[in-house]
Image: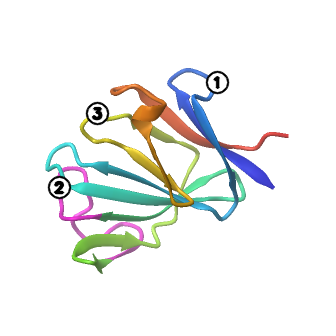
Amino acid sequence: MPYFLEFFPKNSYEPMMQLRVYAGDKFTISYIHSYNKTPVSETFLIGKDCKIVLKETEYEWQAVGLQDTYPIRGVWGYKDGNIYISEINEKLDNIPLRVGIIANHKLTYKNKIIPFLSFAKGGELINIEVKRHW
């Protein structure tokens, strides 16, 4: 059954962008860390229950707001010289995200890269949710 990955402006029920997705699909949000200007990527799974599941995160080195010790959840290690935390399995109802101009947030889904600035304004607070439409 198809779902929709939808991107809403704060306090709105009209999506500014949506993608048809399926349970088990993965997508990645990548960005440049605001303080140390290094790349960060977070990979999510579409759950059968319309949840978004954080599966893994990867970044060059510790920075403000990034895990730098043994994680509360997941398996911590290195991959291609980066800090890599897998098997996080954190279920989320939504992802609140402030679209960054310098951060240059990008969504990668099925090898397609979509810059957040192509559908949202820099500095805008958005919510990312999975919805089922009947």
Residue 1 drawn at (x, y percent)? 81, 56
Q: Which mark is residue 63?
A: 2
Foreground mark, 3 or 2? Answer: 3
**In the figure, residue 35 lies in which quadrant?**
top left
Q: Is residue 123 above or below residue 131?
A: above
Amino acid type, callout 3 = Ile
Q: Secondary structure at mark 2?
A: loop
Foreground mark, 3 or 1? Answer: 3
Toward the viewer: 81 or 125? Answer: 81
User: Is residue 111 found left or right of 48 in the rendered image?
Assistant: left
Dot 3 surroundings within 10 Å: few (below 14), some, or many (20 or more)?
some
Dot 2 surroundings within 10 Å: few (below 14), some, or many (20 or more)?
some
Q: Which mark is residue 101?
A: 3
Residue 39 drawn at (x, y percent)? 26, 56
Q: Is residue 76 above or below residue 110?
A: below
Observer able to see residue 70 = no
Q: Is residue 71 above or below residue 16?
A: below
Q: Secondary structure at mark 3?
A: loop
Amino acid type, callout 1 = Glu
- Which residue corresponds to mark 1? 14
The residue at 42%/72% (across/down) is 86
Residue 54 drawn at (x, y percent)? 49, 59
Foreground mark, 2 or 1? Answer: 1
Q: Residue furthest top?
A: 11
The residue at 46%/49% (across/down) is 107
Residue 45 drawn at (x, y percent)? 57, 61
